[in-house]
Image: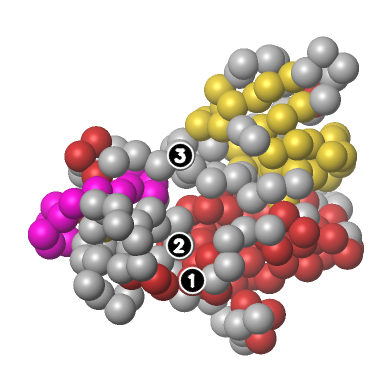
Amino acid sequence: MKFAALTLLAAAPLAALAEGDCGTTIFDIVKKNSQFDTLQLALELTGLDDVLDGDGAFTVFAPTDKAFENLPSGVLDALVDNTNALTDILLYHVVSSKAFSDDLKDGQQIKTIVGRTVKVDIESDGDIEINDANVIDADIEACNGVIHIIDKVLIPSVKDVGDCDKHDKCGFCVGDCDSDHDCSDGRQCIKRSSNKFEDVPFCKGGSKDKTSTDYCSWEI
């Protein structure tokens, strides 16, 4: 896989959030846990390792290697080719406060660092879901926050391009477009006839089917 072969030389966005050492950090735990190899590489690639290695109070919903493997074919490699999109996906798993499982409430909407919310569902037996991901191990405490291990990668909801504007970080928009201008704020207009279409994660439609979808943006 292309992802595993990368030389990790990325700059560190959000560096202002990382200020000093506090002991065993969230990133320390990620590095030491064998089921987080892909998450570790993704954090290092985007520079978010420095954020989760620094001071703060974070809650991280941490996908396992298996969760990344279960993404649709080609999605992870495509995200690696766009570190801005990968950064936003990772930040969709991070909350800027510490929340243990006992702090979570059924039906709660939690705002992540990227600005989109995740939904908490608590079953009658106490099992916790974040969106459609199961929490398989909760309350792994670090000096700068807490980790809840999940079995799926969290993906922001899809909206039609008609619902997107420059004030709305729309996520994986789909719909008709004539130019990038129609997509707003850095999103990319990719026509059905373009050979780039199949390289865009989470696209609905494409040259091999009969849907009317012409466009998909994978930037949040």
The mark found on residue 78 in the picture is: 1
Identify the mark nearer the N-term, 3 or 1: 1
Q: Which residue is drawn at 87% across and 39% down?
A: 137
Indicate the amino acid at tag 3.
Ser
Measured as percent of width and height from the top left, residue 154 is found at: 60, 45
Callout 1: few (<14), some (14-19), or many (20+) C-alpha neighbours within 10 Å?
Answer: some
Q: Do the residues labelled 3 and 1 touch (CB within 8 Å)?
A: no
Residue under pointer 3: 157
Q: How far apart are marks 1 and 2 (CA)?
A: 7 Å
> Which one is in front, 210 or 6?
210
Q: Do the residues labelled 1 and 2 touch (CB within 8 Å)?
A: yes
Position of 71 compared to 217: left or right? Answer: right
Residue under pointer 2: 201
Q: Residue at x 49, y 71 (%)?
A: 78
Callout 3: few (<14), some (14-19), or many (20+) C-alpha neighbours within 10 Å?
Answer: few
Please state the extent of the stretch shown in magenta in the rendering.
170-182
**Would residue 11 be seen by someone viewing this image from the given angle?**
no
SS type, badge 1: helix
Is 138 situated above or below 173?
A: above
> Which one is in front, 19 or 168?
168
Indicate the amino acid at tag 2.
Pro
SS type, badge 3: loop
